[in-house]
């Protein structure tokens, strides 16, 4: 009888270990969801643009769009979330363009037309390469660059922002870290303790010493809005936190007028 009970207990334990091992072995597949198909170009949204290619120090070829706005004071250097590619973000580029901002959209390795495979260190390297190209080849002064990240891109943006001196940084619907997200999504698995990927926005924001804007979505069902509050608490002044109605992926559409106002008011606070 004891042997039978032991065998019965062993089965769920083995299943538990197997699920955990499978999740860890294919960790990147549960974090990055790239799409190689480019659905549109900025021209489809009425935006002027040029295409660019440049290499990272480790030999990855990155693809990017430069969308200049005539007479713009700032250029947005944008890092998107974990799915799709830059062609899925035309509504963002259009919105910033309407604000009078130029936009440089860098595609991560393994996404869209960029080569390679995504990884945490690789994406950090991509961001640094994008910064060098924007401020070097395209000639945009660092003091005229706004680094912007959304969701997963917030960790990439925060890492870069802690290494360079832009005009400011914007983090939209950020999560604190991958281990925290793993614990939130899979509370019954020990992934928060074992995850190799960190993407620790909370830690990286402590290295940012310039104007910072954080935006979270009140009805976010993907990332707990409280994570933005934790990041805000860890950040240095000058910092601003705004909560908008809407979900993780549509808050800027649901609250479009408010989104414009938040950005415009924050941009006005950046020293000349």
Image (cartoon, rainbow, N blue to C red):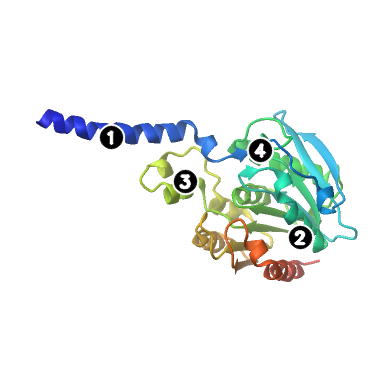
Question: In the rendered image, is residue 232 in sight?
Answer: yes
Please state which of the two labelled residues, at mark 4 or mark 1, is closer to the viewer: 4
Secondary structure at numbered mark 2 = helix
How far apart in space, not on screen, are marks 4 and 3 (Cα)?
24 Å
Question: x%, y% of residue 246?
Answer: 59, 64
**Residue placed under numbered mark 3 in the picture:** 179
Label located before the other in sequence (1 or 3): 1
**Residue placed under numbered mark 1 in the picture:** 13
Q: Give the residue displayed 64% in from the left and 56% down from the top.
A: 208
Q: Is residue 165 above or below residue 2?
A: below
Secondary structure at numbered mark 3 = helix
Q: Residues within 10 Å of mark 4 (few under 14, many from 20)?
A: some
Question: x%, y% of residue 163?
Answer: 68, 48
Please state if 52 lies on the left or on the right of 171 as rendered.
Answer: right
Q: Is residue 132 above or below residue 240?
A: above
Q: Are marks 4 and 1 in contact (CB under 8 Å)?
A: no
Label located before the other in sequence (4 or 2): 4
Secondary structure at numbered mark 1 = helix
Q: Which of the numbered marks, if any, corresponds to residue 95?
A: 2
How far apart in space, not on screen, are marks 2 and 1 (Cα)?
51 Å
The image quarter in which residue 106 lies: top right
Label located before the other in sequence (2 or 1): 1
Q: Residues within 10 Å of mark 1 (few under 14, many from 20)?
A: few
How far apart in space, not on screen, are marks 1 and 3 (Cα)?
22 Å
**Residue placed under numbered mark 4 in the picture:** 35
């Amino acid at each position: 009888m004891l042997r039978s009970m032991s065998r019965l207990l062993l089965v769920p334990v083995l299943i538990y270990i197997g699920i955990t091992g499978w999740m860890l072995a294919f960790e990147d597949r549960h974090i990055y969801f790239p799409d190689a198909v480019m659905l549109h170009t900025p021209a489809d949204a009425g935006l002027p643009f040029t295409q660019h290619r440049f290499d990272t120090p480790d030999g990855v070829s990155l693809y990017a769009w430069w969308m200049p706005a005539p007479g713009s004071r700032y250029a947005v250097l944008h890092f998107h979330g974990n799915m799709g590619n830059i062609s899925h973000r035309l509504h963002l580029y259009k919105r910033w363009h309407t604000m009078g901002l130029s936009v440089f959209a860098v595609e991560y390795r393994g996404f869209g037309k960029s080569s390679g495979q995504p990884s945490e260190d690789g994406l950090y390297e991509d961001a640094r390469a994008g910064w060098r190209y924007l401020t070097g080849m395209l000639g945009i002064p660092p003091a005229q660059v706004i680094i912007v990240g959304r969701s997963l891109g917030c960790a990439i943006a925060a890492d870069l922002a802690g290494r360079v001196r832009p005009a400011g940084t914007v983090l939209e619907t950020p999560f604190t870290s991958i281990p925290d997200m793993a614990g939130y999504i899979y509370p019954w698995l020990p992934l928060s303790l074992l995850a190799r990927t960190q993407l620790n926005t909370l830690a990286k924001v402590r290295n940012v010493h310039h104007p910072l804007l954080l935006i979270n979505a009140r009805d976010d069902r993907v990332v707990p809005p409280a994570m933005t509050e934790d990041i805000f608490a860890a950040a240095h002044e000058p910092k601003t936190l705004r909560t908008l109605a809407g979900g993780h992926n549509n808050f800027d559409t649901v609250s479009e007028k408010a989104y414009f106002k938040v950005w415009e008011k924050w941009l006005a606070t950046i020293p000349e």
